[in-house]
Image (cartoon, rainbow, N blue to C red):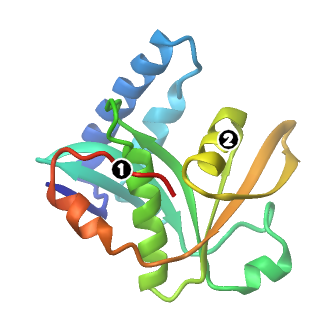
Amino acid sequence: MFEMRVAGEGDRDGIAAMIRRRDAWLSARGWPGFGDGGEALAAQAGDVDFPVWVLVRDQEVMGCTTLFGEVPEWCFTEDERSEPAVFMASTVTAPSEGLRLGSLIAFWALDHAAETGRRWVGRATFEAPLMRYYRDVQGWDLLRELDRRGRSAFIMARRAERRPELAKLFETTSFALGVR
């Protein structure tokens, strides 16, 4: 059974271990990993300034994301920031063939945002392949590409929406998540 909950200090080791598994998986495919950023992300669990959430299955951390209560000024317009929204950042999942844990977390964020009265969810990535995955598989809209500290940042958004199928997906330990 899956559970999505706020991360506490006690989740730090589990988050760090999950990120190390993801790093090894990425490295085996010749892709860049998180490096020291993974340890920094794990250290944010339980920090009130970083609202980290964890996806847990049978007491094991299977993924994490940070869900801020507003979208950042550097990548969203004043009009976009005037609407109630959350910003999803730093999503990492354990390698899991076919489970699409990142999609499960993203769909949870859309549902959570709708349930808490938000109209949409923002997210950003610096990786073009992730942008294409978020856009083409998960259904996010690419709003713009901009320069952020010498790197291309892909700014994305999606309308918040209730996802009633999540309850059933969270009840199982194995599933095949459809797209969009």
Using the rendered image of the protein, determine whether residue 134 is visible from the camera's viewpoint: yes
Residue closer to the observer: 144 or 100 = 100
Q: Determine the secondary structure under disc 1.
A: loop
Where in the figure is residue 100, as x and y percent of width and height?
A: 39, 43
The 10 Å Cα crowd at callout 1, few under 14, some 14 to 19, many 20 or more, is some
Image point 30% across, 53% down: which residue? 55
The 10 Å Cα crowd at callout 2, few under 14, some 14 to 19, many 20 or more, is some
Residue indicated by mark 2 = 132
Residue indicated by mark 1 = 177
Picture layout, residue 13 above or below residue 8: above
Give the number of the disc on residue 15: none
Number of numbered discs = 2
Q: In which quadrant of the rendered view does residue 74 lie?
A: bottom right
Image point 32% across, 54% down: which residue? 54
Quarter of the picture holding the N terminus: bottom left
Using the rendered image of the protein, determine whether residue 48 is visible from the camera's viewpoint: no
Image point 47% across, 34% down: which residue? 38
| Sequence order check, earlier mark of 1 and 2 | 2
Residue type at tag 2: Arg
In this view, the mark in front (1 or 2): 1
Residue type at tag 1: Leu
Where in the figure is residue 11, as x and y percent of width and height?
A: 26, 48
Picture layout, residue 176 above or below residue 169: above
